[in-house]
Amino acid sequence: MGHAPLFTNPDPDAARAFFRSKPKRLIDKVMSVPEAVRQFVHDGDYLASGGFGADRIATALLHEIVRQKKQNLGFAGHTATHDFQILAAGNLTGRGQLLKQVDAAYIVGLEARGLSPHARRVVESGEVELCEWSNYALAVRFQAAAMGVSFLPARSMAGTDTFQHSAAKPITCPFTNAEYVAIPALWPDVAIIHVHEADCFGNARIRGTSVADIAVARAAKHAILSCERLISNDEIRRDPTTTAIPFFCVDAVCEVPFGSYPGNMPYEYYSDEVHLRQWLTVEEDTTTHRDFLDKYLFGCADFGQYLAHCGGPTRLAELRQQELHPEASA
């Protein structure tokens, strides 16, 4: 049996009671990023972030959550790289504690780019309570919630130290007597997901891998989408098979071109590896890190100002060229 605490309630009937009362009308949900975060992200909420690694992350929404100084959030670290690094900026001395509880699969590291010194300091400080999972197990937790069941059986983590530091439990198959791991469902209070296109109602398209985001959107009590482009509902209806997330899962839609920067947005723009390296470098010294955040995050009125600080249209055009025509950028 795993010995870590379970941060969220896996009871499907409690979740169904909430979803039963959630409005499902076709209404215009377009709003600004600050408005969406103020309305749907509250102190003490459990947050899920879409994308995978630094790919298709909802950077603009993440910045605004930190900028509004949300406190005591739970968080699902499902291959959370730059998104976890951004949220950890809310755990700075004198600025409160944004992260309180984390279901961790992959955090702190930015893959081949290296480890985030500040995220590492936050985790090692002990101020954040951790429960460990594999990446697959966290995806199964969202899938269980999307299916409306309290758990799903899996073999992930069985016989590992990760299992011991999780909140999973052993279970015996009633048909074969085989041993499995019971993975509890996870219903986030709010999910933030960046997509390629969405209409005003929240019907959304994702190009490339969707990772676990379709299940995350269905599991979340509230979902905020940021999108590269707002498109018409007529366009959605012309090809409904491309809709990955349906409107009834979504509470807010924010049009944010380059909203995943400095992450990669498949078929749109490449990741800004220079700027991601800058984040890692400034974090080595706490004073330099604080000054960096004061300029690039807390000192920005909105995400557009952040993009301007990072090179603006010229740099963004270079990253689009690198994604669409990598052979010419080599």
Image: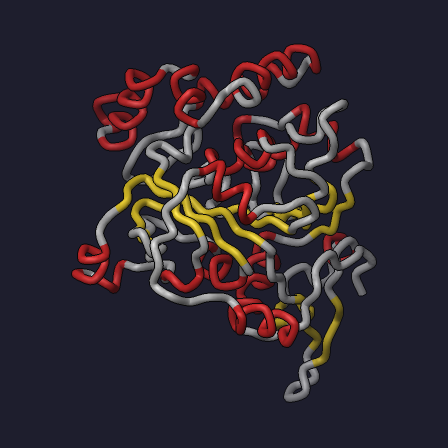
Q: Answer yes or no: is residue 153 visible.
A: no
Q: Is residue 12 left or right of residue 196?
A: right
Q: Is residue 184 above or below residue 40?
A: below
Residue at the image point whose x is 63% and y is 46% from the top: 42
Q: Is residue 10 left or right of residue 232?
A: right
Q: Is residue 36 left or right of residue 239?
A: right
Q: Is residue 17 or residue 53 the one in the foreground? A: 17
Where is residue 213? Give x, y as percent. Answer: 46, 54
Q: Is residue 110 above or below residue 278?
A: below
Q: Answer yes or no: is residue 190 visible.
A: yes
Q: Quadrant of the N terminus?
A: bottom right
Where is residue 204? Give x, y as percent. Answer: 33, 54
Where is residue 45? Give x, y as percent. Answer: 65, 50
Q: Quadrant of residue 292?
A: top right
Q: Is residue 230 above or below residue 241?
A: above
Residue at the image point whose x is 43% and y is 32% from the top: 263
Where is residue 318? Give x, y as percent. Answer: 28, 20
Q: Is residue 231 left or right of residue 271?
A: left
Q: What residue occupies the far bottom of the structure in this picture?
A: 175
Residue at the image point whose x is 72% and y is 26% from the top: 95
Q: Quadrant of the C terminus?
A: top left
**How many numbered circles does the render carry?**
0
Q: Quadrant of residue 248?
A: bottom left
Residue at the image point whose x is 32% and y is 39% from the top: 228
